[in-house]
Image (tube, grey):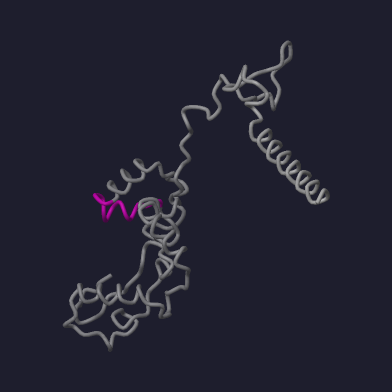
């Protein structure tokens, strides 16, 4: 927020969107902000101020208005920034007019950045983001994971929980259904016979 006498006075810097690095709607104490008017250089252009802000955002230095958060928390905030800006954090007209901190349902963002707001809303619609929570909605599967051929019920009985059987193996023999068990039994029997034969031959000598 630039004062009328800029560049002879520094701007107030507030972040609108939660980032895990700065508190939203809180004046940041930086050498390039209005917290330190005597250290501000009138030769600094807007681009210089933004580069300084980006540099501080990528550091771990703490100052008034900054917060500590893990990398995972910061990534989570970044992923929800489109939603937060266009919804005011999911709040609708919860505070005074123009007060972003209290929540305005994204009204101020729409007024100032109408095209970006439309882009955000289109992105959220395409990505199935819930406008109330900012969370991606779970898409219901069109088909059940269990085919109707696999559903059986005992003759003359009512459908019950647990009446699902393997419909693809109807009519197959017990040996084919339990081939792993049969193979294990064969190997075990072979090993036992080999041991007995070995012990018998040693006893005969």
Depth check, front residue: 184 or 38: 184
Q: Name which residue lies at 43% across and 64% down.
A: 74
Most common SS among magenta residues: helix
Instruction: Tell me if 75 is positioned left or right of 193 in this view.
Output: left
- The total number of labels drawn is 0
- Above or below — where is 180 with respect to 195? above
Depth check, front residue: 186 or 175: 186
Instruction: Tell me if 173 is positioned left or right of 137 in this view.
Output: right
State which region is magenta: 105-116
Q: Residue farthest to the top?
A: 156
Q: Name which residue lies at 28% across and 70% down.
A: 1
Q: Residue farthest to the right?
A: 203
Image coordinates of residue 133 in percent, x first then y, are 47, 48
Image coordinates of residue 152 in percent, x first then y, are 64, 19
Q: Is residue 167 magenta?
A: no
- Above or below — where is 10 with respect to 184? below
């Amino acid at each position: 927020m630039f004062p009328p006498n800029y560049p002879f006075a520094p701007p107030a810097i507030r972040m609108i969107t939660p980032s895990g690095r700065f508190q939203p709607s809180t004046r940041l104490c930086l050498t390039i902000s209005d917290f330190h008017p005597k250290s501000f250089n009138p030769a600094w252009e807007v681009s210089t101020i933004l580069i300084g802000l980006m540099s501080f955002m990528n550091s771990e230095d703490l100052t008034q208005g900054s917060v500590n958060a893990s990398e995972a928390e910061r990534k989570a905030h970044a992923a929800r920034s489109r939603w937060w800006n266009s919804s005011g954090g999911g709040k609708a007209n919860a505070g005074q007019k123009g007060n972003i901190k209290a929540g305005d349902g994204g009204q101020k963002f729409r007024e100032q950045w109408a095209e970006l707001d439309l882009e955000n809303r289109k992105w959220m619609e395409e990505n199935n983001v819930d406008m109330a929570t900012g969370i991606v909605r779970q898409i219901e599967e069109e088909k059940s994971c269990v085919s109707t051929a696999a559903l059986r019920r005992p003759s003359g009985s009512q459908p019950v929980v647990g009446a699902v059987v393997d419909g693809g193996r109807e009519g197959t023999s017990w040996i084919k259904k339990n081939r792993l068990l049969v193979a294990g039994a064969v190997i075990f029997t072979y090993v036992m016979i080999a041991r007995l034969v070995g012990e018998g031959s040693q006893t005969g000598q």
